[in-house]
Each structure stands twice: as structure tokens, then as C-alpha cells.
Image (cartoon, grey):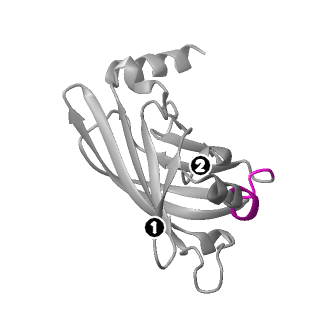
Amino acid sequence: MLKKLTIILMVLGVFKITQAVEFTFNELDGTVTGTAGTPTHDFPIKVTVFNVSISEINPDGYRTIDVLIPVEKITTEHDRRDNHMFSEVLLKDKYPQIRYIATTDFIQPSEGEFVLKGVLKIHDIERKLDIKGFINQINNTWVARADLSILLSDFSLFRPGFGPMRVKDQIDVSVYLKSILP
């Protein structure tokens, strides 16, 4: 026990104590938006509730990033389209959430590009998804941005529509998070 305590104190001596803590972000700290469309027009997608947890540093020097999105909190800002999306595409009653899990060697924020190597789970189907983004500091606030694309076919999701007017396979997503970190 004494050896374990000594190691913890050594780690805390090398890194500030605030670097070891868990961070949590949600819709108050940023946005998750996107664009879907048909061959003739695009429409917005907005996630109104989400949770991003960045774990404490594990003994190997990594953190786990866990993103949870309740399916019922995704909207296209069009009730009829949303109801169709929930009942025929995302099947919100059977699969109530979308989850992304990644690991990172993020210890303390630093400006520059980042890549999260993780797994996206939709409808119990998991696919590797690397997310590339950029983090920068504006005064004492850290801002992270990332853009990514998801193919509905990768998750065997039904593409609604009529004849050639089906929803496109690719959904583009933008993530923006900001926070005053210790």
C-alpha cells in the first residue's frame, strides 16, 4: 500500500493534480451538428443533448473518451422527418443511444491537431472511426473542433425516401466543444 501511495504522489508531483481529473462536457459546452440530404436538398441535423466524458489518466498514461448521444435528442428541426427517422431509421425504442469510445494520450490541453482512434456504435454495430480535429486556446478557454462523416450503410441503416429521392448515404457531422479547463 505504501508503494502504491508513493507512486501516486510521484505522479502528482510530476503532473499538476488537475491534470489527473476527469472532464465532462455536454450541450452547454458546445454543439454537435450535421447535414444530411437527398439528391435535391440538404437538411440540418442537431444533437440537443449529449455527454462527453474524458476519464482520469490510467496507469498506462491514457484517457478514455466516452461520447453518449440519446437518439431521441437528435433532430432535423422538422417533426414529421424526425418521427420517420426515429421509427424507421434509428429505431430509438430498440437502440436508444449512439456511443463513441476512444483512447487518447491527452494529459493537458495543448494547441494543435489531434486524432482520436475509436469505435462508433450504432444499432449494436461497431465500426472503427478516427476523428481528426483541432484544439486551440482563446484567452483562458480551450476550444476543440472536429468534422467527420458517417455512412449509413456502414451501420446497415435504412435510407428513407421514394425511388431515387432517398436520403444520401453520407451524413456530415461537426463537433464544437469549449471549456475553461484547470
In the image, is residue 95 above or below residue 108?
A: below
Please indicate, yes or no, whether residue 98 appears anywhere in the rendered image: yes
Label 2: element kind: strand
Please indicate, yes or no, whether residue 171 appears anywhere in the rendered image: no
Q: Amino acid at mark 1?
A: Asp
Return the residue nearer the eye: 113 or 76: 76
Is 133 left or right of 102, judged from the image as shown?
A: left
Return the residue nearer the eye: 102 or 170: 170
Toward the bottom, the furthest residue is 164
User: Which quadrant is home to the C terminus?
Assistant: top left
Measure the C-alpha gap from mark 1 to mark 2.
Answer: 16 Å
Is 12 left or right of 5, judged from the image as shown?
A: left
Which of pointers 1 and 2 indicates the residue nearer the eye?
A: 1
Residue 141, position in %: x, y? Answer: 27, 29
Q: Is residue 90 magenta?
A: yes
Residue in the image at 60% along x and 15% along y? 1
Q: Which residue is mark 1?
A: 42
Magenta-highlighted residues? 86-93
In the image, is residue 177 above or below residue 153?
A: above
- Local crowd size for mark 2, using a 10 Å CA cut-off: few (<14), some (14–19), many (≥20): many
Label 1: element kind: strand
Residue 10, position in %: x, y? Answer: 40, 20
Q: Amino acid at mark 2?
A: Ile
Q: Is residue 181 magenta?
A: no
Residue 120, position in %: x, y? Answer: 59, 57
Residue 42, position in %: x, y? Answer: 45, 67
Q: Which residue is mark 2?
A: 74
